[in-house]
Image (tube, helix red, strand yellow):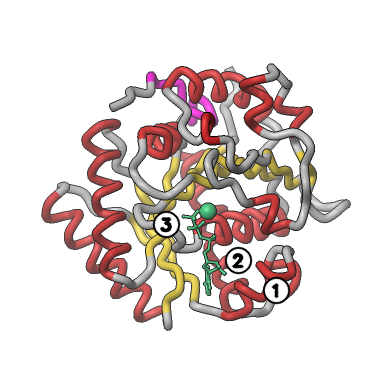
Amino acid sequence: MSKNTTISLSILSGKGGVGKSNLALNICYALHQIGHPVLLIDCDMGLANMDVLLGIAPQQHIQDILINNLNPAEVLVPIGNPGAAPFDLLPANSGMAEFAELDAGARGMLREKLNPLASAYDFLCLDIGAGISATAIGFAAMTALRIVVITPEPTSLTDSYAMMKVLSSRHSVQDFYILVNQAESSTEGRQTYNRLAAACKRFLGFAPAYLGEVRADKAVSEAVRKQKPLMQVSPLAPAAVDCMAAANSLQRLRENLLRTEEISAPLNSIVIHDF
Ligand SMILES: Nc1ncnc2c1ncn2[C@@H]1O[C@H](COP(=O)(O)OP(=O)(O)OP(=O)(O)O)[C@@H](O)[C@H]1O
Ligand SMILES: [Mg+2]
């Protein structure tokens, strides 16, 4: 059997509003710019907003795959630059309360429908809703890598610690990559990571890895108001430069993973246990 080269990653956080969706969009954009085909999936079923960040109004959504049995290919929206590597979005519909939480069966069904599509991409990126709901944790447990977005605020640290504790105890997942958002400097980013990593090592028995930091930058909210990716409208802004650095690290991580491990399926086929 040929080796799978698609790496799935989820972007998650304990505390809400730390910048997951903006970082997911811009890191994916950066990966696309450096030549990787990317599929970005809005998995924040209750409060999806990737379409708003992009200023688009898709007709079909991820929920249609589950409700109306649509093929994922019918739901994809190309959002990349023409002529470059593909960059596609699987948008979600916001405000469908009955779909805010997906049980293990629905997540499993989605996984089965998405995996055949995944081989066209180098990266599959799941933007996940904040917190430790069974849905958020279940999606995070499906991917090969997990990027935990934190900010220097103590509440962000304690909430992300709790999230990693749940994922490690319920799903035996211990490979986390910390991305510190809204850092004043790389020193503050590293110090924030060190505090969290020390607590994890002491009380959970493992330390997450450091992916990097993204500086606090008003260009982020300016791009949100323009409804365009920061990487597109202000590629030289500090936060955009940091997103590109994170994308370069992910590229190296993918190369290392492909050298050392057999990645069996983009979205893993282990049974997802609910709790
Ligand atoms: N590096 C940054 N510098 C300045 N502002 C930022 C930065 N990153 C994110 N923001 C701002 O933080 C706000 C929240 O961002 P975002 O919606 O991406 O967070 P989220 O973690 O996805 O939220 P939710 O938990 O609701 O899904 C946005 O208004 C955005 O402009
Ligand atoms: Mg979000």
Q: Is mark 3 within 8 Å of ligand 1?
A: yes
Q: Nearer the viewer, mark 1 or mark 2?
A: 1
- Which quarter of the figure has residue 2? top right
- Identify the residue at horizontal 75%, vertical 33% (top origin): 60
**Which residue is the extreme one toward the left?**
202
Q: Which residues are magenta?
A: 263-271
Examine the image and state in which quarter residue 149 appears.
Answer: bottom left
* Residue 221 visible here: yes
In this image, 255 relative to 86: left or right? left
Frontmost of labels 2 and 3 is 3
In this rendering, which labeled residue sits more in front, label 1 or label 3? Answer: 3
Give x and y (percent) for residue 62: 65, 32
- Residue 16 circle label: 3
What x and y, as percent, mark residue 261? Answer: 44, 34
Query: Is 10 placed left or right of 159 in the picture?
Result: right
In contact (CB < 8 Å): disc 1 and disc 2 = yes
Q: Identify the residue position indicated by label 2 in the image.
A: 244
In the picture, measured across the screen, residue 153 lies left or right of residue 4, that is left
The three-letter code of the residue at mark 2 reads Met
Q: Position of residue 240 (x, y in %)?
A: 62, 72
Which residue position holds label 1? 235
Name which residue lies at 68% across and 26% down: 64
User: Based on the displayed image, in which of its 4 quarters is residue 245 positioned?
Assistant: bottom right
The prevailing secondary structure element of the residues shown in magenta is loop
Which residue type does callout 3 highlight? Gly
- Between 1 and 233, the residue placed more toward the observer is 233
Disc 2 within 8 angstroms of ligand 1 (CB): no
Q: Nearer the viewer, residue 24 or 131?
A: 131
Q: Secondary structure at mark 1?
A: loop
The crowding category of the residue bearing disc 3, from other C-alpha atoms within 10 Å (few below 14, some 14 to 19, many at least 20), is: some
